[in-house]
Each structure stands twice: as structure tokens, then as C-alpha cells.
């Protein structure tokens, strides 16, 4: 059974999208229940496998957010108009995942990170949550990946 079109580098974009969606659910659960990344991964791994997603990527996102949460929150702070704890929980989870990708997954283009974050928040978040997430991530990417952003603009 084919999982969908793969790029030349072997990455299946559909599987990555599914991984991000599951990671959002896992990070959201971590935020609400206080469960650690290991238990969140275990909780969602079975369902993840049935979704034919990139399990390794899912686990990296959840572990990454779990282990770098304080640093991610601190790095997002200059781009927020309120404290991270006041941001809608779905948007907060997606901002943390996208911040992790922007800072630690340099193999993923910043535009892909932002686009995937917006699609995911549109699906699971509040009506205008994607607008807020877009503004935060646009400003963050311009700073964290300045050379890449500049190269795209020229």
C-alpha cells in the first residue's frame, strides 16, 4: 500500500502532516494533564501507527517540545501580546511545536513549518486562531531563520 507521493529525499509530506496533527494532540494533552512526553507518546503511538504517519517525526516533535518547553516559551515571548499561558491551549501547543521545528529542525523549510502550523490550527483551533499563530511565527521566523527568510524574499 502506497502512503502517498514521496519527495526525492524520501519524505512523505502527507505522513508529516499527520504526524504534526497527532503531535498537536499529544502536546495539548501534556499541557492539560501534565503528563510527560514519554507517556504522551505512548498514549498516541498506537493511534499514530494506524494513521500511517511518520512515527519518528511525531516522537521527535513531542519529545522536543517536552524537553525544550521552557526555552521555547521564552523564545516565543517577544512575539506574543500576552503570556504564553494566556494563549489558547491549541494555539499554544501549535506555537510550541512550530517553534521547536523552526529552531531544531532546520531540515524543514520555515515556510513549510508556518504553512503546516496554520493548516493545523485552522482545523483544530479557534475561528481566528490561525491569524494569531501566523503573526507570531512570521516574526519568529524572520529572526530565528533570518538568512532563509531573506533568501526567499530576494
Image (tube, helix red, strand yellow):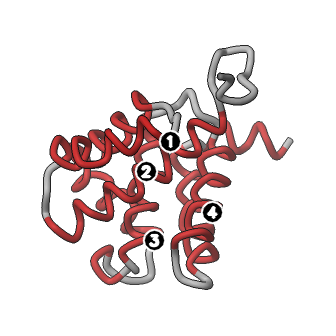
Pointer 3: residues within 10 angstroms few (<14), some, or many (20+)? Answer: many
Q: Position of residue 101 (x, y in %)?
A: 47, 42
Q: Are marks 3 and 4 in contact (CB under 8 Å)?
A: no
Q: Is residue 57 above or below residue 40?
A: above
- Distance between mark 3 and mark 2 Cα atoms: 14 Å
- Residue located at (45% from left, 71% from top): 91
- Distance between mark 4 and mark 1 Cα atoms: 21 Å
Point out the tag, 1 or 2, that comes first from the N-terminus: 2
- Distance between mark 1 and mark 2 Cα atoms: 9 Å
Q: Are marks 3 and 2 in contact (CB under 8 Å)?
A: no
Q: Secondary structure at mark 2?
A: helix
Point out the tag, 1 or 3, that comes first from the N-terminus: 1
- Residue located at (66% from left, 44% from top): 112
- Distance between mark 4 and mark 2 Cα atoms: 15 Å
Task: Quickly name the residue at label 3.
Answer: 91
Pointer 4: residues within 10 angstroms few (<14), some, or many (20+)? Answer: many
Q: Position of residue 115 (x, y in %)?
A: 67, 54
- Residue located at (56% from left, 27% from top): 107
Point out the tag, 3 or 4, that comes first from the N-terminus: 3
User: Relative to the observer, which residue lies in front, 108 or 47?
Assistant: 47
Give residue 38's quadrant in the image.
top left
Task: Quickly name the residue at label 1.
Answer: 51
Q: Is residue 63 above or below residue 31?
A: above
Residue at the extreme front of the image, as rendered: 1
Task: Quickly name the residue at label 4.
Answer: 118
Q: Are marks 1 and 2 in contact (CB under 8 Å)?
A: yes
- Mark 4 vs mark 2: give the one in front: 2
Task: Quickly name the residue at label 2.
Answer: 22
How many labels, in total?
Answer: 4
Q: Position of residue 12 (x, y in %)?
A: 64, 28
The answer to whether residue 120 is left or right of residue 115 is left
Amino acid at each position: 500500500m502506497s502512503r502517498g507521493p514521496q519527495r526525492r529525499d524520501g519524505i512523505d509530506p502527507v505522513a508529516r502532516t499527520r504526524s504534526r496533527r497527532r503531535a498537536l494532540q499529544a502536546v495539548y494533552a501534556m499541557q492539560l494533564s501534565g503528563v510527560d512526553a514519554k507517556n504522551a507518546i505512548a498514549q498516541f503511538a498506537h493511534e499514530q501507527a494506524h494513521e500511517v504517519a511518520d512515527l519518528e517525526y511525531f516522537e521527535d516533535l513531542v519529545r522536543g517540545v517536552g524537553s525544550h518547553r521552557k526555552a521555547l516559551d521564552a523564545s516565543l515571548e517577544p512575539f506574543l501580546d500576552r503570556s504564553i499561558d494566556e494563549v489558547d491551549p491549541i494555539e499554544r501547543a501549535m506555537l510550541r511545536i512550530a517553534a521547536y521545528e523552526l529552531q531544531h529542525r532546520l531540515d524543514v523549510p520555515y515556510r513549510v513549518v508556518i504553512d503546516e502550523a496554520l493548516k493545523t490550527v485552522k482545523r483544530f483551533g479557534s475561528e481566528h486562531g490561525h491569524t494569531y499563530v501566523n503573526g507570531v511565527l512570521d516574526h519568529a521566523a524572520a529572526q530565528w531563520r533570518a538568512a532563509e527568510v531573506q533568501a526567499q524574499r530576494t
